Amino acid sequence: MRRFILLSGLLVLAIGGLYAQEHSLSDTILLDEVNTYATVKKYQAGAKLESISNEQLQLSSGGGLDQLLMRFTPIYVKSNAGGLSTIRLRGTAPDHTSVNFGGLNVNSLTLGHSNMSSVPSYLFDGLDLQYGSSSAVNGSGSIGGAIYLGLKSNWTDGMKVQSTITQGSFGEQLYGAKVFVGNGRWESVTRLFYYKKKNDFPFDNPYTGDVENREPVADRQNGASIENKGLVQELNYRFNSREFIKSAVWLEHDWHEIQPNMPSNLHYKTTEQLDNKHVRFWSQYENNKQSLNYRLGVGYVHDMQVYDSIDVQRIGTDRLVSELEVKQDINSNLGYKAGLKYKYMVPDVYAYSDEVVDNEQHLDAYVSAFATFWHRLKLTLNLRQSFVTDFDAPFTPSLGAEYRLFTNDLSVLKLTSTLARSYRVPTFNDRYWGTQGNPNLKAEDGMNYELGLNYIYCRDDFQSDLKLNAFYMDVKNWIEWRNFGVWQAQNLMEVVSKGFEFQSNTDWQLGDNHLNFRLNYNFNPVEAVENVSESGVTHRQLIYVPKHMGNVFLSLKRKAWLVYADGAYTGMRYSDEFGREMDPYFLTNCGVSRQLKLGKQGFNLSFSVDNLLDVDYQNERYYAMPGRSFRLSLSTNLNII
């Protein structure tokens, strides 16, 4: 029934967009692009890229990216309530999505992925998402897609302060501040963030151990507390409008108790904890004054994890990154860029032998080009070759195309297509963990094929953007950890992920009322078509990947008021190789906010309810999730000078 409702809404919105009345086509369509350090779209015609709006970032700024992605995109995130969330973009593994901060992929070198709940959306101005393979642009790991964390260049003239305070259910607290200081030429931006949640929510626990009486008992979650704090400090200087230097350091300290599962929560009251500290720095100089432009960047990342305060079991890494890039637009229809990116990485992991690995070096050489023909067809080509210490990485090309099938004063219909190879170098843990690491692993090797339609309609009071993308991805040498008498990483599977995504974004101005409606639906069958292991499963949906998921968002702005509601459906998932199923669920959230003025200073007061219908659900088997919760926030926007 829920699937029928989602599909019916999709059809109605598509028909409504096609038959809307015509007036004029705006040059700016719906979504503002995030101003990241690197140009994401120029050299990737045909790639599916989406910008998360500032409004949605603000609505989900209480925690990490996990809630933002699950509520507002067709992307599944496997999560529990205790601070661990991993992304499954288009059915791929968590280490198949790169998370980019400036010129850095901040994914862990040991695990290969980022914890989505510990990437605070509050610290960033925007978010770009790339669906599908982008290894030719981002290097190793971008098999399923990429996330770009955006910092806008405001070039502040004066001083302004933004701050927020949030209090919520189950001990939730958020304190944040952003301080902008500058004179129009130089700028300092300081962003501070503190988030804490006790997570002592009540729930009905069915895992009592009593096989005769299966009635659940009232229980309360313990050992799932979260405490995250972070700082982003920017220092930017522009010599003129085409020459500037930008620097940003991101300090993050994330701590959480490891949430016990339901049986343990009922019978045992012990808690374990995980402590992560991160230092991420990126600085780049860019000169666009001549016909041949160039960019020079340098970065550093330090990651350190300590389990349960056992300091001798440190898991740390350090990496230095440098990049040199030149680019030239020969004319408005033809251009290219070329560059080198070097990474020097040193592990500090108690389970690694110094005789096996002391350091590792990567050198990536890349070339990209774009060409436009007849003002309708745009082609892009990306080529990348990575050289890795004692490892063979594949040559990685991608080809993209975008063709305007139809254009008039009010609407545009575009056909998009991409063909891209992708790869992932195995993580340090995969190759070097104790006696279980496997130094003979091959790189995961994928091919991505995609075809899309994008219809844009725009007049003065109505805008609509509809996207339909079909994709097919084949990944060979898929790495899994399996128990072959001892747990070890092996190239076990060939995995095929296919399906389609529909996304719509519609804005409608009715007098003083501004309506925004968004709808996402994702159909994603993904299975292993070959499995080397005798115990491996083939031709069945991969575990923790829903075949169906979708969400809807509706907001109404009227003068100083904003009212919104959103709902997200997550389909059935398998939780293990034995085929045990997890029930689908549908979560709804809503809220209201009011902008206030005190002199020239602005304030915003908001109240929201998560899981409005108090749904009892699990996103990871045997792990409880909170029911209905409330949140009250006060934000300020003060112009000091």
Image (cartoon, rainbow, N blue to C red):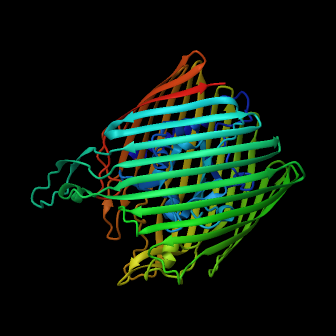
Q: Position of residue 72 (x, y in %)?
A: 50, 43
Q: Visible in this render: residue 86?
A: no
Q: Please say if 376 is above or below 508.
A: below
Give the answer, above or below, for where 513 lies relative to 278: above
Write down the quadrant of residue 24 in the picture.
top right
Tell me what residue is drawn at x 45 percent, y 54 percent.
77
Between residue 123 and residue 376, name the one nearer to us: 123
- Residue 467 x %, y %: 61, 47
**In the picture, which quadrant includes the C terminus?**
top right
447 relative position to 541: left or right: right
Residue 474 is drawn in which quadrant? Answer: bottom right
Residue 270 placement (x, y as % from top left): 24, 58
Q: Nearer the viewer, residue 90 or 548?
A: 90
Q: Is residue 395 left or right of residue 271?
A: right
Instruction: Give the answer, above or below, for where 40 lies relative to 108.
Output: above
Does residue 319 sit above or below 235 in this rendering? below
Left or right side of 484 for 122? right
Left or right placement of residue 404 versus residue 72 in this view: right
